[in-house]
Amino acid sequence: MPVISVENLRKRFNLEAGFFARFGRFVHAVNGISFSIGNNETYGLAGESGCGKTTTARLLVRMYESDGGIIRYRDSTDIRALSGKALKDYREKVKYIFQDPARSLNPRMTIYDVLVSGYRASSRFPGERQAREEAVRILVETGLSPDDLGKRPSEFSGGQRQRISIARGLLMRPELLICDEVVSALDVSIQGQILNLLLDIREKRDLSFLFIAHDLRVACYFCDRIGVMYRGELMEEAPAADLYREARHPYTRLLFSSVSGNKVESLPIRPAPASGENDAPAPRCPFAPRCVLAEERCFEERPEFGEVAPGHRVRCFRVEREG
């Protein structure tokens, strides 16, 4: 039974903002994606900035409300229907770690208050004394010192602040941790430390992860399975090892070819269309305007998300024909 499953999830935003903005033109940020995350599994969502990865993650914790689709937690009721205590209980089990800890940690709070402010409002809060003991243990587990509890976020480096964000997410013993570009703003050496920390935490705590990344190399190192997104849709999904060895979709190959040292054959690419040119989903492959391999059919029909090997799905007519 999956920890969380998503079916045909959709979200659109009005193209213009402000009180006097016109209504009627939309950006379809998430356009009918489906995936699931199993117990103790790390599922990655990868793609360029603006492809819908973060919007998808925020829909899972209802920071945004979806326009359609189903989100089920352990095969229970659609979480979009939860409210009150039921929604609060769900959010205690699914925690979100933001990309930029400098903005997600309140600079006026001590680290202890950063860690336990949400804990105090939860049904699991054991009292200040035990909460402080748990905060000390979680800081040590994430590579920090008990003496850091009285400090403030500004006294730490970027990598240390990210460790504090991870500690805050772990304090209520969640079952699913959503990591939104948690290493993208860090130096390469610090990235490795944070990724190895998360791997250790996953093994010790039997956690599941949704890992958001734009770097496919990092995603392949950390994840069990990866879904590659483009313009709100999944273009390819496969076990990480298979994707690294044999990326099939032209867009996935483009992402791999941009990583230095990768041996994936590079494809020429057309410029991305302007943001207003693809506001509404068109009955075509969303990548067709940029793909040099695109055929007439690619501009007239939307390819299915079909399986080309066990656990390996691709949305591409050319891949379907080649088998």
Image (cartoon, rainbow, N blue to C red):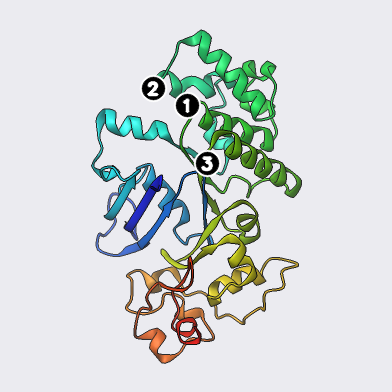
Q: Amino acid at mark 2?
A: Ser
Mark 2 in CB contact with mark 1 (< 8 angstroms): yes
Residue at (28, 42) in percent of width and height: 76
Tag 1 secondary structure: loop
Quadrant of res 68:
bottom left
**Structural crowding at the residue carrying mark 2, measured as other residues with C-alpha within 10 Å and reported as few (<14), some (14–19) or many (≥20):** some
Q: Which x, y percent locates residue 240?
A: 58, 60
Judge from the rendering whether residue 110 lies leftward or rightward of residue 23; answer left or right. Answer: right
Mark closest to the chain's N terminus, 3 or 1: 3
- The nearer-to-camera label among 3 and 1 is 1
Separation of disc 3 and disc 2 at Cα? 20 Å
Judge from the rendering whether residue 190 lies leftward or rightward of residue 173; answer left or right. Answer: right
Q: Which x, y percent locates residue 288?
A: 45, 80
The residue singled out by tag 3 in the image is 98
Residue at (55, 14) in percent of width and height: 132
Q: Amino acid at mark 3?
A: Phe
Mark closest to the chain's N terminus, 2 or 1: 2
Q: In this orientation, which residue lies closer to the viewer: 179 or 161?
A: 179
Mark closest to the chain's N terminus, 3 or 2: 3
The residue singled out by tag 2 in the image is 122
Residue at (33, 30) in percent of width and height: 88
Q: Is residue 117 visible?
A: yes
Separation of disc 3 and disc 1 at Cα? 17 Å
Determine which of the numbered discs, if any, sits on residue 47 in the image. none
Determine which of the numbered discs, if any, sits on residue 172 in the image. 1
